[in-house]
């Protein structure tokens, strides 16, 4: 009996790597080993942020959109599937759930977030009720004051003759013409250049965008998410680098220019000259 137990094979279940472990292994193993400072300069991402991604210390990076944007560019630079890395990080951060509830399976684990959320709401409203209860006289005074103001407005409102008088039409203020973007605008950057910008960039996918002037100085560097736009300064000497060239729409004087490259392809040294952009094939 003992011999059978000792001779039996032990089957080990493979452990799934985290997103950080996959990034670290891709950078440190294989023929092309690379150092973080080198990649940091190429991607214009701080070394501490790359180290945080590899160690899984996502709280060190300020916003989730930056975490996912940096991770996508880092994964593409290391030859990994960016969607797999981003989805892993979302699961590790709790932005999406892994639990799949079948009819025969225990769904208690999937229900936990809802229970926690319900408890949190109860605690919040309990504190609000306690605060109102302790300061009820101030709330009552505020309600009375609002009622008096409303009553005064009603009593002092103009008569029926004035009410029937057509209201003056507010003058129409001319606005700067904008391109007919394919994606609804989320956030605008470089608004100081808005009135004179011949070139406007809009992200249709997550993409890191860097703009440099004629001397090589960086004037803009940010991960844009779908809907974000950037007004490029009106000067033919500016050049751009896209972490995801196929994910950026380039508008020249309201006309959509050809893409600078394919999706998930890094392109650099792209001239922001309107003539150059429209001549791209």
Image (cartoon, rainbow, N blue to C red):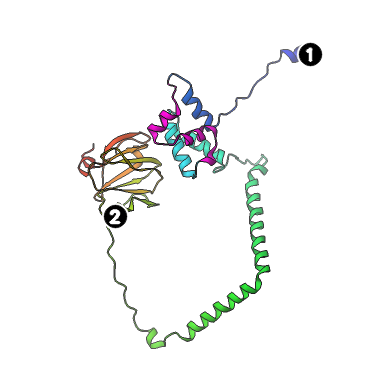
Seen at 65% across and 72% down, the residue is: 136
- Residue 208 painted magenta: no
- Which secondary structure, mark 1? helix
**Mark 1 sits on what residue?**
2
Would you say 60 lies left or right of 218 here? right
Would you say 69 lies left or right of 127 here? left
Q: Earlier in the sequence, mark 1 or mark 2?
A: 1
Tell me residue 228's x, y (percent). Answer: 38, 48
Residue closest to the eye, 15 or 4: 15
- Residue 36 painted magenta: yes
- Which secondary structure, mark 2? loop
Kindly check if marks 1 and 2 are in contact, taking CB atoms under 8 A apart as contact: no
Which quadrant holds residue 127? bottom right
Q: Which mark is residue 62?
A: none
The quarter of the picture where the N terminus appears is top right
Q: Is residue 183 above or below residue 29?
A: below
Q: Is residue 194 above or below residue 110?
A: below
Tell me residue 36's x, y (percent). Answer: 45, 29
Q: Is residue 194 above or below residue 56?
A: below
Which quadrant holds residue 222? top left
Seen at 57% across and 29% down, the residue is: 16
- What span is in magenta? 32-60
Seen at 42% across and 35% down, the residue is: 73
Seen at 48% across and 37% down, the residue is: 86
**Mark 2 sits on what residue?**
178
């Amino acid at each position: 009996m003992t011999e059978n137990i000792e001779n039996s094979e032990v089957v080990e279940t493979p452990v799934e790597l985290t997103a950080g472990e996959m990034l670290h292994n891709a950078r440190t193993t294989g023929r092309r080993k690379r150092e973080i400072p080198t990649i940091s300069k190429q991607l214009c991402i701080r070394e501490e942020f790359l180290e945080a991604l590899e160690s899984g210390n996502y709280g060190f990076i300020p916003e989730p959109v930056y975490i996912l944007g940096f991770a996508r560019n880092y994964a593409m630079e290391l030859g990994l599937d960016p969607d797999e890395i981003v989805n892993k990080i979302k699961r590790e951060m709790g932005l999406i759930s892994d639990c799949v509830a079948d009819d025969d399976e225990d769904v208690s684990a999937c229900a936990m977030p809802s229970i926690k959320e319900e408890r949190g709401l109860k605690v919040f409203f309990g504190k609000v009720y306690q605060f109102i209860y302790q300061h009820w006289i101030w709330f009552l005074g505020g309600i009375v004051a609002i009622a008096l103001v409303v009553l005064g407005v009603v009593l002092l409102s103009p008569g029926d003759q004035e009410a029937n008088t057509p209201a003056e039409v507010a003058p129409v203020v001319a606005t700067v013409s904008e391109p007919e973007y394919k994606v609804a605008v989320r956030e605008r950057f470089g608004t100081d250049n808005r009135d004179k910008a011949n070139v406007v960039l809009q992200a249709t996918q997550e993409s890191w965008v860097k703009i440099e002037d004629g001397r090589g100085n960086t004037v803009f560097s940010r991960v844009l998410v779908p809907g974000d736009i950037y007004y490029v300064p009106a000067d033919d000497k500016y050049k751009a680098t896209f972490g995801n060239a196929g994910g950026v729409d380039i508008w020249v004087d309201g006309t959509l220019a050809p893409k600078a490259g394919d999706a998930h392809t890094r392109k650099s040294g792209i001239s922001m000259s309107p003539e150059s952009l429209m001549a791209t094939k």
